[in-house]
Image (spheres, rainbow, N blue to C red):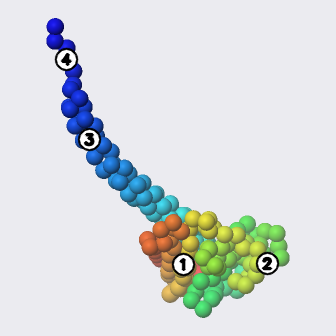
Amino acid sequence: MRQAGFTLLEMLIALAISGVLMIGVARFLPLLQVANLRTLMALQLHEELRLMMGTLEKAVRRAGYCSGECAGAGLTIGGSRGECLLLRWDENSNGKWDRVENEHSDFYGFRLREGNLEAQRGVDSCKEGGWEKLNDPATVMITEFNVVKTDGQVRLRLSGYARAFPQQPLTLESWVTAMNL
């Protein structure tokens, strides 16, 4: 009776071929993981910048709204390169802009500071403290926040990069019609 099976030589050849394939896969896997991480970080960066841009667009659209007689500018651009945005709108529709001292102040600000986009309610200056970061500084660095107003249009420009891959920056730009200004 004859038994079927592989010979020792066939087993050694199969092992050698498998070893070569495993070495190839072992070299390719880290590259695949880095590419996957890079794609994930780019997606996260785009999502964070898009959310911040949405917040800025909404604030600019509201700027200047008043259901009564409000005095002053609804939108002020500060900083040497337009990196601070101060806004006012009558959020509770009481016919006036509640001052910064008020708990329900109608004054809002956004600024770029030390790689972060910051926001605060109840401010009328870009220099005060107590601002809240809108981005996670451990993962995203904001390199540019720029505001330009021309006629009834406001251009918002936001640039940043994921800290893990600084060589892949992203810039978003949006033109918003400021209806109340």
Q: Amino acid at mark 4?
A: Ala
Q: Nearer the viewer, mark 2 or mark 1?
A: 1
Please state the horizontal and vertical placement of residue 165, each as a whole percent of the image: 47, 68
Image quarter (top left, top right, bottom left or bottom right) of the C terminus: bottom right
| Marks 4 and 3, the one that precedes in the sequence | 4
Residue 18's spot in the image, x, y percent?
Answer: 28, 40
How packed is label 4: few (under 14 Cα within 10 Å), some, or many (20 or more)?
Answer: few
The answer to whether 91 is drawn above or below residue 1 in the figure is below
What residue appears at the point 22 percent right and 37 percent down from the top-left corner?
13
Residue 86 relative to residue 164: left or right: right
Q: Position of residue 88 (x, y in %)?
A: 68, 77
Q: How many marks?
A: 4
- State the residue position of label 4: 4
Q: CA distance from mark 2 to mark 3?
A: 78 Å
Determine the image quadrant of residue 67.
bottom right
Quick one: label 2 or label 3, which is nearer the N terminus?
3
The residues tagged by marks 2 and 1 sit, at their Cα atoms, a distance apart of 31 Å
Task: Name the residue tied to disc 3.
Answer: 16
Q: Residue at x 63, y 88 (%)?
A: 79
What residue did someone put label 1 on? 143
Q: Does 115 appear above or below 165?
A: below
SS of the residue at dot 3? helix
Q: Earlier in the sequence, mark 2 or mark 4?
A: 4
Spatial CA distance of label 1 from label 4 is 69 Å
Task: Identify which residue, 95 or 167, lies in the foreground.
Answer: 167
* Residue 163, numbered label: none
In this figure, which residue is indicated by the disc labeled 2? Answer: 99
Q: Secondary structure at mark 1?
A: strand
Q: Residue furthest top?
A: 1
